[in-house]
Each structure stands twice: as C-alpha cells, then as structure tokens.
Image (spheres, grey):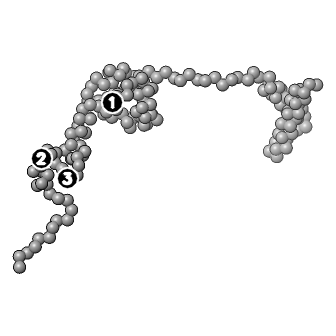
Amino acid sequence: MTDETTNTVELATELTMAWLSNPNTRTSAEDVPAFLRSMHDAVIGLSTMPVESPTEEAAPEFTGAVTARKSLANPDVIISMIDGKPYKTLRRHLSTHGLTPAKYRERYGLKADYPMTAPSYSTVRRDLAKKIGLGRERGKKASGNAEDLVSAPKRGRPAKAVEPA
C-alpha cells in the first residue's frame, strides 16, 4: 500500500469510529462495513478531485434603466438609473440600495457633477433657505445696507426701562 492509500484508509476508519461513538447513532454490526466502505469511497473521491482555483468573478455590468440625458430631461424630477422611477432627490433612494452618490455615479459612468436632486426642487429649497436667513452672518439683514444693520434689533434680554424720579 502506498502512503496515500494508507492515509485514506486511516481517515475513513477515524470517520467511522467518530460516527459510531456518537450516542445518537443506532446501527447494527452488519451496517458498519458498508458505512466504512462508503466513507472510504468518499475520502478517495475528495482526495482525487481536482483543486479548482477560485476564479475572480467579473464585476457585473450595470446598465441604467434610462440614459443620463433622459434622467435629467424633466426639471421637476430626476429619474433613477436603478429602477427608472422619478424622484425629487436620490439620496434616500440610493441608501436603500446600499449606494452613496459617489458609488452611484461610478456604477453608471456619470460625471462627478451629476445632480442628486431635481433642479426645481433645488430652487425651491434654496429660496426657502434664503427666506429664513440661512447662510448669512448673525444679525445681518438680507439687503446688507448699513442703516439696516444699525436699526436691526439686538438679540438678548431687553434693557430695563428707567422711570424718571
């Protein structure tokens, strides 16, 4: 016997002993040789199988549901390239698919300046932000005139009124 044959017989014997030592195994003495033979055949089958090298799976090619031009055609919505549905903003939609805006742009070959919100929605949000005063320094008015800055009410606790004596 060669060393490999001895090794497979020993391995099959150890597997059979482990199977028999399990308290849940209920078998008769006549079944042991058949089980040993099947274990030996299995070990030989495993040892003679060609070793397959793990092949790198090619990255799947993603094709957009619509073209980039069509996704931006309507100023009221932006159409997702994932499912072809219209959205005002894509950020939440992308996060449900496990993507960031950068990964989304990379996946579909979009430019770095491809928008994530519809143009009209961006305009509405910008106007609302200007209306409530976001982006300005504290205490300044939107016009920026010097007289407006002087007449602007001061923040904080009002001064106490002094009564004449």
Q: Which mark is residue 139?
A: 3
Percent from the top left, x then y, of residue 145? Answer: 12, 46
Label 1, label 2: how many angstroms apart (C-alpha)? Answer: 35 Å
Q: Is residue 95 left or right of residue 29?
A: left
Residue holding disc 2:
145
Q: Which residue is mark 1?
A: 115
User: How far across and down, in percent of the image, does residue 68 sit?
Assistant: 35, 22
Q: Is residue 104 left or right of residue 27?
A: left
Which of the two discs, 3 and 2, labels the residue nearer the N terminus? 3
Whole-angstrom CA distance, mark 3 to mark 1, is 33 Å
The residue type indicated by label 2 comes to Asn
- Of badges 3 and 1, nearer the viewer stands 3
Give the camera-side residue of 2 and 87.
Answer: 2
What secondary structure is marked by label 2? loop
Q: Residue furthest right?
A: 1
Of label 3 and label 1, which has the lower sequence position? 1
Q: Secondary structure at mark 3?
A: loop
Along the horizontal axis of the image, is 159 left or right of 32?
Answer: left
